[in-house]
Image (cartoon, rainbow, N blue to C red):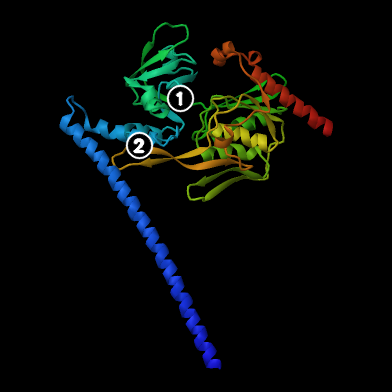
Amino acid sequence: MRKKQIMTTVALMLLTAAITYCITLYASEREYNAKLANLSEREAEYAKIAEVRGYIDKYFVEDYEEKDITDGALYGMVAMLGDRWSYYLPAEEFSAVVNSTSGKIVGIGINASYDSDAGELIVLDVFEDSPAEDAKLQPFDRIVNVDGADVSQIGYDAAVKKIQGVAGTVVSISVKREGAPNLITLSITRREIDVQSVKSKILDGNIGYIKISSFDANVDKDFATALANLKKADVKGIVFDVRNNPGGLLNVLVKTLDPLLPEGIIISEENKEGKSMTHFSDKNELNLPMAVITNEYSISAAEFFAAAIQESGKGKVVGTPTTGKGLAQSQIPLKDGSGLILSVSKYYTGRGTSLVDTGGIKPDKVVELTEDQTKRFYLLKDHEDPQLQAAIEIVKGQKETTEEQG
């Protein structure tokens, strides 16, 4: 009887193994067939591209550069993803992107954002003692053409990189300027510019102020110096200004925020496969009232800076809603030196919020600039800036509340 039971058990094990093998074989076969189908579809796509290229080679009557056709196809391929932050760049422009976050740039000395509806670069800031200042370029000029290339065709980043170029060379830009009936064309000689992305001062009422123009390399070190100087001056609170800040490097953002925040999650990211990485702050935090000023040109890292201060309860956000860029890009070099800037993961705030879903950071106190104040943004004195004044009042209010509780 015992032998019969053993034989029955063995038979059942063999049957189970056979069923498992069949299921595994079936699943593998389905996966293999799916890959074959995908491969066939890809081959058909490539054959279609080759077919069109053949007709161009055979029948097109005008002259053309073969490289331009290839670049155009790659531009279009990435553009059809529908992601404004992903794009293809030829070799020279891709190299400029790779080197653009070093804290030094070769160019004309401006910060700019992109009006995707109009296809124009908006000049946000003209650096002091820069080629752009020498050429009389003004904030809120709209750049529509760079060295013969239409900005609406090549997009924000490609246009910015064309402007940067090589030191000692001349770039020609055409701008729209309010009040000017025609386009203004400027020829500007590029040079290396040391970008000052962190500026600080003490405002009336002994309130500290730190302006962060970007989160490029070394900004965290410059920020730490500015913060230390304000603490030595025994300021009663700090206003952080990230208006017109286009973002920058994740590690710089984390290092900048860490000394301000209590222990917890600063930001996390998740890739296509669902793998995530979380960045934390330690227990050390700044125990001063804070406020962050934002606007619609606060992008990416600038938005997450504001989100971290807001979500942690360390301070309030003042101004207007931010852009809503919650995707992280990777720089992918191709064999010929060209490359892709491709969105490869999603960012989430400390509370797990995607800015893509929310459309950006919503201020605790919405304060808008008038049309005239917007035009004169970089010329405004402190008392003429209602967003700054509102942030100062919030910091003073937090200080008074803390003193009452104490």
Q: What element carries label 1?
A: loop
Quadrant where the N terminus is found in the figure? bottom right
Residue 83 image offset from top left, x and y in percent: 45, 35
Residue drawn where x is 26% and y is 30% of the image: 68
- Residue pointed to by mark 1: 116
- Of callouts 1 and 2, which one flags the residue occurring earlier in the amino acid sequence? 2
In this rendering, is residue 193 above or below 11? above
In-front residue for pair 267/60: 60
In which image quadrant can residue 403 be found? Answer: top right
Residue 340 located left or right of residue 397? left
Residue 15 located left or right of residue 209? left
Residue 7 located left or right of residue 26? right
- Residue pointed to by mark 2: 77
In which image quadrant can residue 161 be found? Answer: top left
The amino acid marked with disc number 2 is Met
In which image quadrant can residue 231 be found? Answer: top right
Quadrant where the C terminus is found in the figure? top right
Q: Are marks 1 and 2 in contact (CB under 8 Å)?
A: no
Residue drawn where x is 23% and y is 40% of the image: 50
Residue drawn where x is 70% and y is 27% of the image: 235
Residue 269 image offset from top left, x and y in percent: 54, 44
How packed mark 1 is, by other alpha carbons closer than 10 Å (few <14, some 14-19, many 20 or more), is few
Residue 35 image offset from top left, x and y in percent: 36, 55
In this rendering, is residue 27 above or below 191? below
The answer to whether residue 224 is seen in the rendering is: no
- Distance, label 1 to label 2, CA atoms, is 18 Å
